[in-house]
Image (cartoon, grey):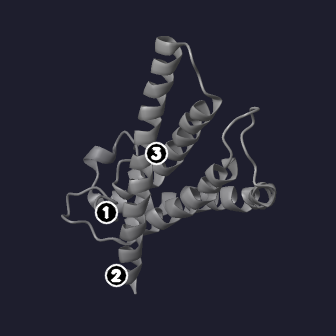
Amino acid sequence: MQNAFLRVCRCADRATLVVCGGAGLVLAVMVLVNVVLRYGFGWGSIKLQDLAAYAFAVFLITSLPVTLARGGHVRVEVLSERLPSGYLRAADTIALFVFVIPLFGLIIWAGWNDLLFVWSIREGSLTSGGLGGLWLVKTMLPVASALMILQGVAAVLAPPARPDDAPGKGAAT
């Protein structure tokens, strides 16, 4: 059962990585296109600006579970380098249950009614003449929150590759 869960988390991580990378690529291209069009040709597009903003939002929110799955989160502990790996695993487990699950669970719970509303009206751009589909971008927040919870649990459940490895490394890569 645990191995099946970890496989699902790895597949979710790979899909999230593709979405995150695609959004980063779209963001870079759209910023370049917008700059060239505006300063090279004196022409701009609200829809292209919206696409860059949407890509930035998706890139930012999906980078969180991708980073957590790879153990790339920042540790603020001063002594963790000198402590055994068992301490780090225990600290990660406590952090998962005290911070990650409650925080991202709250994001899902508190934003659920707003998400249902934006889906019901198919919310579009906030600017006149802008790109539609903002409701799809806003959907990424609870999706990424659920992925954060999944990747946090996977990081705690996955055995470290070597005893010296930091917890979470290789959990869902």
- Position of 78 with respect to 136 (left or right) is left
Mark 2 Cα shell of 10 Å, populated few (<14), some (14-19), many (≥20): few
Q: Amino acid at mark 1?
A: Gly
Question: Which of the 4 quarters of the picture holds residue 162?
Answer: bottom left
Q: Secondary structure at mark 2?
A: helix
Circles 2 and 1: CB atoms closer than 8 Å? no
Q: Residue 50: percent from the left, percent from the top?
A: 61, 35
In percent of the image, x 33 and y 55: which residue is there? 70
Residue 30 percent location from the top left of the image: 48, 32
- Distance in Å between CA atoms under marks 2 and 1: 21 Å
Q: Which residue is identified by label 2? A: 3
- Give me the C-alpha separation between circle 3 and circle 2: 30 Å
Closer to the chain start, of discs 2 and 1, is: 2
Q: In this image, 128 relative to 161: left or right?
A: right
Residue at 46% of width from left, 13% of height from top? Answer: 40
Compare residues 38 and 9 and report the one nearer the observer. 38
In-front residue for pair 55/165? 55
Q: Which residue is mark 1?
A: 86
Q: What amino acid type is highlighted by mark number 2?
A: Asn
Q: Secondary structure at mark 1?
A: helix
